[in-house]
Amino acid sequence: EKLGDPGRFLIPCDFLEFDNCLALADLGSSINLMPLSIWKKLKLPTLNDVKMVSELADRTISKPMGVAENVFVKVGKFYFPADFVVLDFIADPRVSLILGRPFLSTAHALIDVYEGEIIL
């Protein structure tokens, strides 16, 4: 039997300065992505330079502001280190971050598309 689209996989996460954040788990992304507005809100240390350009979902090309390294993301009772590419764009207020394959690998994520669940 052919099944429909299971929808998106959202991960609830917390930061010291920012509770109840939702992040999109994106197996199609080779980076973790954070909007500049969230980086400022979290008061993270200086961004490291990065030489890359990113093509966003709407096909616009954007040069990242930099990389925030070793940001600890709290999921449940566990903390996972992640590097985030920081871009100046207007994010969906409901989903603040995109967690790509690097984070999902670090967190040993198991994604069951059929059941519609993600386990970290």
Image: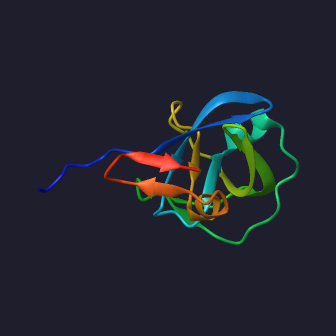
How has the structure been colored for display? rainbow
Asked which quadrant contains residue 51, the reply is: bottom right
- Residue 112: x, y in percent? 40, 54
**Whole-percent x and y of residue 82?**
73, 56
Task: Classify residue 47 by image quadrant.
Answer: bottom right
Please determine whether, in this image, residue 39 is positioned above or below residue 108.
above
Residue closer to the observer: 79 or 16 = 79
Left or right: 3, with 94 as reference point? left
Q: How many marks?
A: 0
Q: From this viewpoint, which residue is outermost toward the right?
A: 45
Q: Is residue 26 left or right of residue 1?
A: right
What's the residue at 69%, 27% (across, down)? Answer: 19
Above or below 50: residue 60 = above
Along the line of sight, the residue nearer the viewer: 84 or 116: 116
| Residue 75 on image: x %, y % | 66, 41
**Which quadrant: the N terminus?**
bottom left
Residue that appears at 50% across and 57% down: 110
Q: Residue at x 80, y 65 (%)?
A: 49
Locate residue 100: give its quadrant. bottom right
Q: Nearer the viewer, residue 112 or 56?
A: 112
Is residue 93 shown above or below 113?
A: above
Where is residue 65 drawn, in percent x and y?
72, 55
The furthest residue to the left: 1
Horizontal relation, residue 56 to residue 15: left or right: left
